[in-house]
Image: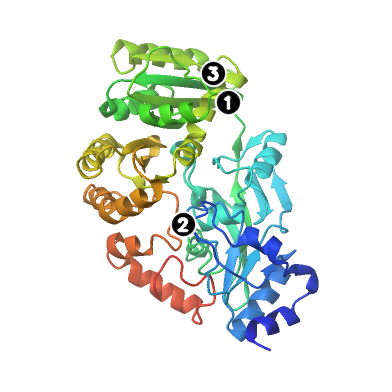
Amino acid sequence: MDSIAQVLARLSPGIVTRDQDIIATYTTDFRRQYAGSTRAVLRPRHAAEVQDIVRCCAELGVPLVPQGGNTGYCTAATPSDRGDELVISLERMNRLRELDRANLSVCVEAGIILSELQQAASEADLLLPLALGSQQSCRIGGNLSTNAGGISVLRYGMARDLVLGLEVVLPDGSLYSELSPLRKNNSGYDVKQLFIGAEGTLGIITAASLKLARKPSRTVTAFLAIDDITSLAAILDLAQIQTGELISSFEYISDTSLNLLLDARKDLRHPLQARSGHYILLEAATASPVLNLEETVTGLLGELFERGLVTDGTIAANGQQVAEFWRLRECIPEAEVHHGGSVKHDIAVRTSRLAAFVQAASQIVREDAEGAILSVYGHVGDGNVHFNVVAPSTAQAAPFKHQFERDVSPKIYRLAAEMGGTFSAEYGIGRVKMDLLERYGAPGKVDLMRRLKAALDPNGTMNPGKVVIP
């Protein structure tokens, strides 16, 4: 009996899935670019069962691949194609343990779906600020393991900024549990931060205590046209000042991205009569029952028009129109898939340098990949731009993307580094960006990561082959 068979024989049959038809849904990454293999998927129901699984695997040297909603872009939750790893899915650990309205906090298990947690907070008249395009299927454990970003980072920060406490099963099967939802706890190392963004390589997050915010009583959403991308920073600055920093989202959409979407989705329409090269989706929100947010945003738009920073725009008149505006932003990845897929660059630079980056990177593409279609959009209020490239209509998508990734993408990543930016704003590292981390990681960082990995997971059984090269 080999090691995997011994592990499976020791575990409760109720948590082991061996049916390969079911397993197939766990072994292909979200973008369907990598297919792995495993003999079983383990689906524990509580932290003690996770501990049992990890102890067995540690003792017998069987690698584990933790998985949440399997919505990541960097294949961190996908097993290798060797078939020598087991997948552990946290999907059955989906309870809401406690919601403390007065403390603005919630304690949940790692397998809860993000949208379900958002709904639970809303029913308590509160807000979970984390919001992603995949929120109907991604799970909190995965969100924290990848340090997810999303559309509200500008106001509320990344996923790690919402974490008050964690429960984690360590690579030897022991349990680190510090779930107290305290805002102040200055008692030594902030150990929980080790596991946020570690993508399951240092332990398996099984529960978390998270910050909540007061639910907005008023939200105003505007779709604006601008002629000059270099005005983005000035518009954001003015918007924050005039609203008292109530801007929760500040999204950029290029005209090319919007056109790709409208071509792919005939049910969607352009919200403005006059076309422009660039658009902003701006949203402001407040929990105040007395502040006239509509008047504030209307005044802001008037100032933007007067200064010539905005050429056209409209404010959503109702919830349906708000949803239509956001659909234009959130469905752009779908449009790229419709046109053969894209080469994705998840870049972040200082907000003051973002326009310069887009202009310089666009010039690189024009010079090195003639006819390529640029799809540029993102959460530019926090400096994150998705600089994606779609194959020309005259080229075959797969060979074009392969050649672009080999010959042109390195120039884009080098440009980001030269401008003090990063190659990974919110997608993480996984399997596909380890070489970029080696090349562009902060001095000493990668070496320190290796030492942490060796200290916590000396046998290398926790999500091997991801994030950091041994």
Which residue shows up at 65% across the image and 73% down it? 39
Q: Position of residue 124 (x, y in %)?
A: 71, 36
Q: Position of residue 97 (x, y in %)?
A: 73, 53
Contact check, label 1 and label 2, Cβ < 8 Å: no
* Residue 291, numbered circle: 3
Mark 2: secondary structure: loop
Q: Within the image, what quadrant is residue 59 found in?
A: bottom right
Mark 1: secondary structure: helix
**Of the residues under marks 3 and 2, which one precedes in the sequence?**
2
Residue 207 visible in the picture: yes
Vertical side of 248 occupied by 18: above or below: below
Between residue 335 and residue 126, name the one nearer to us: 335
Mark 3: secondary structure: loop
Residue farthest along the left direction in this orientation: 367
* Residue 74, numbered circle: 2
**Of the residues under marks 3 and 1, which one precedes in the sequence?**
3
Q: CA distance from mark 1 to mark 2?
A: 28 Å
* Residue 463, numbered circle: none
Q: Is residue 55 left or right of residue 334?
A: right
Q: Position of residue 142 (x, y in %)?
A: 57, 55
Between residue 374 and residue 315, name the one nearer to us: 374
Q: Is residue 46 left or right of residue 208?
A: right
Foreground mark, 3 or 1? 1
Vertical side of 34 occupied by 341: above or below: above
* Residue 323, numbered circle: 1
Contact check, label 3 and label 1, Cβ < 8 Å: no
Instruction: Determine crowd level at label 2: few under 14, some 14-19, many 20+ residues with C-alpha closer than 10 A.
Output: many
